[in-house]
Image (cartoon, rainbow, N blue to C red):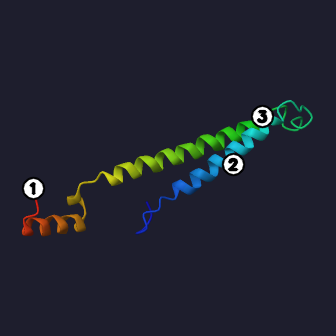
Amino acid sequence: MSGATGLDVRLPIGGLFTVLGLLLAGYGVATGGDAELYARSLSVNVNLWWGLVMLVFGLLLLWGASRTRRAASARPATVTPEGRATEAREHERGLER
């Protein structure tokens, strides 16, 4: 996570790579039968392979961001100074169960 806003930069970057990977892999699938297009790359469909690489990379970023978000939201209140202060205030007022 970054800063006080809590924005994880892996979310937009992972989304960008996922969308671009889907587009590039789709283009590679659509032009897979064109041998003349891929003659310069030794008949390797580079659009398909790099699209798949970008797709996997984007999905890994999104997976990592979702894992961190889940772990961050499950922290007990006593971990942060604000949480400890809230717990102490509730204890003073008798609001604990």
- Nearest to the observer: residue 45 or residue 66: 66
Q: Is residue 9 left or right of residue 22?
A: left
Callout 3 secondary element = helix
Q: Mark 3 — residue?
A: 29
Residue 64: percent from the left, percent from the top? Answer: 47, 47
- Quarter of the image for the N terminus: give it: bottom left
Q: Is residue 34 left or right of residue 97?
A: right
Specify which label sits upstream in the sequence, 2 or 1: 2
Three-letter code for the amino acid on which mark 1 is drawn: Arg
- Nearest to the observer: residue 62 or residue 89: 89
CB contact under 8 Å: marks 2 and 3: no
Q: CA gap, disc 3 to disc 1? A: 60 Å
Residue 65: percent from the left, percent from the top? Answer: 47, 50
Work out whether 91 lies above or below 11. below
Q: Mark 1 — residue?
A: 97
Q: CA gap, disc 2 to disc 3? A: 14 Å
Specify which label sits upstream in the sequence, 3 or 1: 3
Q: Is residue 29 left or right of residue 69?
A: right
Three-letter code for the amino acid on which mark 3 is drawn: Val
Three-letter code for the amino acid on which mark 2 is drawn: Leu
Work out whether 83 lies above or below 76. below
Q: Mark 2 — residue?
A: 20
* Residue 77 image-quadrant placement: bottom left
- Look at 86% across and 30% down and name the residue there: 33
* Residue 35 image-quadrant placement: top right
* Furthest-right residue in this view: 36
CB contact under 8 Å: marks 2 and 1: no
